[in-house]
Amino acid sequence: MNILKLVASILAVLAIGFAGSFFTAQSVQTWYAGVEKPFFTPPNWLFGPAWTLLYFLIGIVLYIAWENGFWNDSRVKATFFTQLGLNFLWSILFFGLQNPLAGLVDIIALDIAVILTIVYIYHHSKASLLLLPYLGWILFASALNFAIYLLNA
């Protein structure tokens, strides 16, 4: 096990999440507080720990892909970075621009990108299963985003 690669992988993914949270934090207490939300909206305090855990798992998958050489599969690399980019972009669209419709379009693309990432990594390793909690969370977030869009359109 290459500890340096593991730490670098986890920190890289956490950094992307932290950067996205910059847009989220500014709107949670202002715009988002006034948005009509569905009954299944989790409490705000849950999002930070949930995302931290998910980014940690994503970082472990990045490490496994990098360490075991299947990072050279262009599909793995493309879908992995696409889903990270879409994840970051969602925070900008939904919270930064306060646009649930744009966020919805992005998160649907994110759902697809994560599914493809899981499939492509699974061809090399069952480590892709570490992304299943992430997929579950973003599918839930998609439903939440859709409901917020409908309630506030």
Image (tube, rainbow, N blue to C red):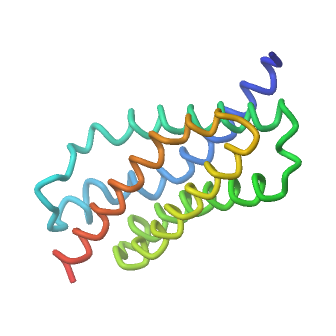
The quarter of the displayed image where residue 35 is located: bottom left
Q: Residue at x 25, y 54 (%)?
A: 29
Residue farthest to the left? 39
Q: Is residue 10 above or below residue 121?
A: above
* Side (left or right) of 68 relative to 139: right
- Which one is nearer the viewer's eye here, 123 or 16? 123
The tally of labels here is 0
- Which one is nearer the viewer's eye here, 121 or 107? 121
Where is the C terminus found, in terms of image quarters? bottom left
Q: Residue at x 80, y 27 (%)?
A: 5
* Side (left or right) of 87 relative to 97: right
Residue 37: horizontal and vertical position, in percent?
16, 62
- Which one is nearer the viewer's eye here, 42 or 99? 42
Residue 100: horizontal and vertical position, in percent?
34, 73
* Side (left or right) of 140 relative to 86: left
Residue 125: horizontal and vertical position, in percent?
71, 35
Q: Residue at x 46, y 61 (%)?
A: 91
- Which one is nearer the viewer's eye here, 135 or 105? 135
Residue farthest to the front? 123
Q: Residue at x 22, y 69 (%)?
A: 147
Where is the N terminus found, in terms of image quarters? top right
Residue 126: horizontal and vertical position, in percent?
65, 34
Q: Is residue 48 above or below residue 2?
A: below
